[in-house]
Amino acid sequence: MKLTVNGRDHEVEVEPEMPLLWVLRDELGITGPKYGCGLAQCGACTVHLDGVAVRSCSMPVGAVQAPVTTIEGLGRPDALHAVQKAWIEQQVAQCGYCQSGQIMAAAAFIASEPNPTDAQIDEAMSGNLCRCGTYPRIRQAVKAAASLLKEGRTNG
C-alpha cells in the first residue's frame, strides 16, 4: 500500500487493519507520534490527515486516503511552525511525552480558528492529556502561535 507521509511517498506491506501509528513508528521509523492509550483518548498519537488532526492509534492504515503529516513534517527544515516556536518560547514541555500530539492538535486548531478565545482553546485541546499539567502554558502557547501566524512571523 502507498502512503504519503511528510511529503514523501512510501510503499508499505502491512495489513490494512494495522493502526497508522504502528506503520509510522515500526515500518517507517517515524517516532514523533507516541503510543499513549491505544484507545484514541489521550492524544499522544495525533497526526494530521490532509490538515485535520486524527488519532493514529485507532486509524486503520487502510482507511488513510490523504497525506499524513507528523510532528517531523510540521515545520520546514529552515523554519519552525508557529506552534513549535510558541511551544519553545512559552516553555511548555516538561516530560515531553505528550508534546508532539499537543502541538499537532494545536496546529490544526489554529488553522481553523485564527483568533481563539481561552474557552475555545481549552475545548479544542481537552482531548490531549498532559500528565505534567502544563495546561496554562499550552493555552498561552496556542494564543502566541495564533498571534505569530497573524503577524506572518513564521510558517503555518
Image (spheres, helix red, strand yellow):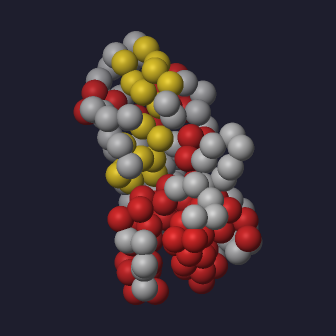
Residue 124 place in picture, x, y as percent: 39, 72
Nearest the viewer among 149 and 3 is 149
Residue 39 place in picture, x, y as percent: 37, 52
Nearest the viewer among 148 and 39 is 148
For residue 130, say whether it is visible: no
Residue located at (35% from left, 65% from top): 112
Nearest the viewer among 48 and 7 is 7
Total numbered badges shown on the rendered structure: 0
Asked if residue 124 lies left or right of residue 26, the reply is left
Asked if residue 19 lies left or right of residue 152, the reply is left
For residue 52, say whether it is visible: yes
Residue 111 place in picture, x, y as percent: 41, 62
Residue 138: name its quadrant.
Answer: bottom right
Quadrant for the N terminus in the image: top left
Residue 106 place in picture, x, y as percent: 49, 64
Residue located at (60% from left, 47% from top): 75
Establish if 55 lies above or below 8. below
Residue 17: name its quadrant.
Answer: top left
Asked if residue 113 lies left or right of residue 140, the reply is left
